[in-house]
Each structure stands twice: as C-alpha cells, then as structure tokens.
Amino acid sequence: MEIQLNRRELLKLAAAASLPGSLFTARDAFAQGSGAIQLACPVPMSGPFAANGKFADLGMKLIVEQYGKVLGRPLAYTTLDTEGKPATAIRRVQEIAQQKGARFFAGGILSSEALAMGKEAEKAGGIFITTAGADEITGKDCNPATFRWSVPTFGAIEQTVRPLIESMPKAKRWYTITPQYVFGEGLLTAAKNIFKEKGIEHVGNSYHSLTEKEFSGYLTNAAAAKPDVLLILNFGSQSSDTLRQAVSFGMKKNCTILMAWASGLEQFETLGADLCDGVYFGAQYWHAVASPLNLDLVKRTQDRFKQNPNYSLAGSYICTKLMLDGMVKAGSADPKAVIAAMEGMKYDGLTGPEEIRKGDHQVLKNYYLLKGKAKAKMKNADDYADIVSAGKSFLPLDKTECKMA
C-alpha cells in the first residue's frame, strides 16, 4: 500500500516537474549538449524500494537544474533502474559507462547494490557516492572511487539505541526484527555490542528476506517475548509494514518502539501522525534542521516540487552536489582529480558542518533521534516529529578495516 500511495504522490510531482513517462528521454535531451558532463543516478525505480528511488531521481534533477553548467560544460544525467538488485545495478552502470561515457554516479539505496556499484565504478575509472548504510562500504570493501554521505550502521545504532537505553534505564528487554542481508547484519551487530556493554537482555531476533511483506508471524514472536523495546532494523516499505503491523498488534501500548533507520518524511506521510505518535525514529536527515544549506534546499524543493525534501531526495541532492563541487575545486572533470579534491573536503552541509574523511571517504555528519508527535501538537503539515538528540559517531579510521588501494 505504501508504494501505491507514494506513486500517486509521485505522479503529481512528475507533472509539476515536467517529467516524461520514459526514464531516458528527458535525460537524453539534457545529454545532447556538446561536451556534457555525464552523471548517472542508479537507484531502484521498480520493486519494494521504488519510492526511495523516485525521490532520489528528483534530488539529482534539482541539483543538475540548479548548477546547469560546471567548468563551462552542460550537465547531463540519466536515471538507471537498479531494481534493488546487485546484478542489475552492475549491468546498468556498465551500460551507461560504455554508451555515454558516464563516470559520475550518485545512488544505491540498498547496501548490497551499493557495494557492487562501488566496485564497478572503480573498474570504469569513475566515482560513486551513496547513501547506503553497510559499514563495509567505507570499511573492508572501501575503494578509491567510492564515497558515502550517510552515517554507516555503526553510527546509526550509536545515536539511537545508546541514547534510548540511557534515557530508559528500566527498559532491559529488547527484541529485534532484522532484514537478512549486509545492512541488517551491520545494524544488529552494532546493537548487540551495546546490549552486551549495557547489560541489556536481547530476548529475541527475527530475520526476514528483502522481499517479505507480511510481518505478523515475526511480531507474534516479538510480542510473546514481552520486550520493553521493539527495535526495527529494516528499511523503507518493509519498516513501514513492520511498524504498522506492530501497532495493530497493540505493541505500542505494551513497549517502546524504535525504528533505527527511518526513510524520512515520505514515511511519516504514509504512516500518518497517529501511528507515529510516541515512536522513536533514527534519521540521516530531517527537513527542519536550520543549517544554511538545508534552509536553501527546503526553499528550492518547495518552489520546484511544492513539498519539503525528504531523506531520499536530500541524500541524492547532496551526493551529486559533492561531486560537482569536487569538479569545481579540481578545475577538472577528470575523476582522479575530482577524487583528490573531494578527499578531506570540509563544507557547510545539510546537517551542519560536514567533512569527507580522506582515509575512507566517509562523510562525518550528524545522525538524528526523532520522536513522533501527536497530531494535535503538529505545528504544520510536515511537523511529524521532534529531534530528541543528534550527534556524530564513527569508528576510528584504524578500526574501519578500510585499506585504500
């Protein structure tokens, strides 16, 4: 149901943004310019994570329109449907690199596809920047071509599970629901480490596949374990379905619910304030943050798309912006020169001061703990949550296992 709702919204957005039905025609019109710098947005445009991909497409569209040209050359971009599958993602990257000479890629919603595309971008002599979460992306599987804006799984758990434990010392029993792939495993491992440190009883975990839509069986097991806290470790429509079904099971009355990695504003819009009230959410981005760049993005998004930016849109916008700013700083669109220019870059970002750490290409930025608020307390249509806390938690470079080739 969530994807259908989002698609209806996206049809309105598409009309506002004058997007054609074909994913390629509009971008091809951009691309006909002589000497255009070719960008690509490889994200799921179909399947369970299509809503995230479609907002990511709008984010790249917005920044490409804003900049227009870089180094006196027009910007062209193509959206690639990865379907959320690593094999498809690799093929799409290979095709656009060969057919259009694209070397600048911002995308990858799922960690599994992002890991695959980062390696492919390196082979193609390009740059890949992502918002995916697995620690390995800027850890043991890092490479010189890959950058990441989002806080990895380690930091997401440190900035959600840890502060919640500290604010709720009597909540000793936690149950987890985890997607069985690299992203979920990273979140679960980080959570277990904090549980052990803090003397928390991990009363159970339910694994599920990336195609799962029915979570009632897992929630039956969770409810039977009588947890003080239900920790939801999946993402996108799966986390929405999990939360919706957990509330229908009455779990919000009997325990605290924390969704460690929310997909942002579109998720709140889909779920509604009544369902989100009192639930805790971890977030990479929130439109109400008052940093200068975010205030500018909010205005641009409202002017262009008649709505506030959500995480998927904002992440794509900033990832693409970092590559474009790297080109300007380097005075070149040669990927190697751009990589060198991006390394160590400090800038005023969407979450405040941000920095690209040279050793692993990880952006050091805030992660937020939000709490859903009652509908009666919302100050405007998008005021779904308050920021409880924010902070930066990253493994030291020597603990990331990143060894740049």
Image (cartoon, rainbow, N blue to C red):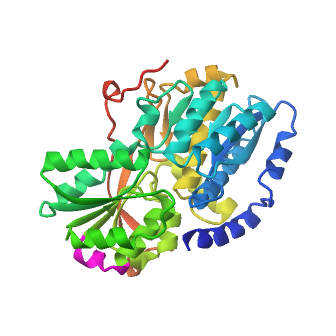
Asked if residue 187 is among those painted magenta in the image, a careful observer would answer no
- The secondary structure that dominates the magenta segment is helix
Q: Can residue 29 be seen here?
A: yes
**263 sits to left or right of 172:** right
Q: Who is closer to the viewer here, 362 or 82? A: 82
121 lies above or below 158:
above
In the displayed structure, 268 sits above or below 139; it is: below
Residue 253 in the magenta stretch? The answer is: yes
User: Which of these two is toward me, 57 or 142?
Assistant: 142
State the residue at coordinates (83%, 30%): 35
Does residue 93 appear to the left or right of 382 in the view shown?
right
Region in magenta = 248-255
Q: Is residue 142 left or right of residue 47?
A: left
Looking at the rendered image, the quarter that the N terminus falls into is: bottom right
Residue 5 x, y percent position in the rendering: 60, 73
- Estimate the x, y position of residue 167 in percent, counting from the top left: 18, 59
